[in-house]
Amino acid sequence: MPTIRFVREGRDVKCSVGANLRQIALREDLGLYGLKGNLGNCGGCGQCITCFVEVLGENSSEALSPLTEVELAKLKRRPKTWRLACQVIVKSSVIVLTRPQVPFSNSKKLIAAATDAPLPS
């Protein structure tokens, strides 16, 4: 079973191969959305683009499904490491930063610790 390491929340969550990243975050009651997303998200259709996540680590491209057409259109002005959680299918263990557009204290230290620690397979 893959493990998703949620950096901001400081949690490792197990999931099934083929699980949707947004659904995992919501199931685990993690802070996927900021205020705007909490007030009005699209329910996982990729239209509101409020479920940004940043995928960290060396194996990030192989760990998740390829970018969808929706993501290619909606994220063209965003960093290449950003994804829409609602469009992502988990294939293997990965490290994720929710709400990467919102700074938080000790972010560099927490990101370094999360990426340095081995992920369970």
Image: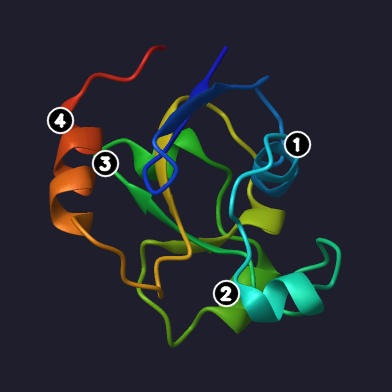
> Where does label 4 land, which residue?
116
Q: Which mark is residue 27?
A: 1
Q: In front: mark 4 or mark 2?
A: 4
Q: Amino acid at mark 4?
A: Asp
In space, the residues marked 2 and 3 are separated at their CA atoms by 21 Å
The colour scheme applied to this rendered structure is rainbow
Q: In front: mark 3 or mark 1?
A: 1
Q: In front: mark 1 or mark 4?
A: 1
Q: Nearest the camera: 81 or 104?
A: 104
Q: Is 115 drawn above or below residue 42 in the view shown?
A: above
Q: Nearest the camera: 68 or 37?
A: 37
Q: In front: mark 2 or mark 1?
A: 1
Report whether 103 appears left or right of 46: left
Q: Amino acid at mark 2?
A: Leu
> Where does label 2 land, which residue?
72
Choose top left, top right, bottom left or bottom right for residue 110: top left
Quarter of the image where the N terminus is located: top right
Q: Which mark is residue 15?
A: none
Choose top left, top right, bottom left or bottom right for residue 114: top left
> Where does label 3 land, which residue?
57
Q: In front: mark 3 or mark 4?
A: 4
- Which residue is drawn at the image coordinates 62% and 82% (left, top)? 73
Choose top left, top right, bottom left or bottom right for residue 101: bottom left
Q: Amino acid at mark 3?
A: Gly
Looking at marks 3 and 1 on the same chain, the residue that comes earlier in the sequence is marked by 1
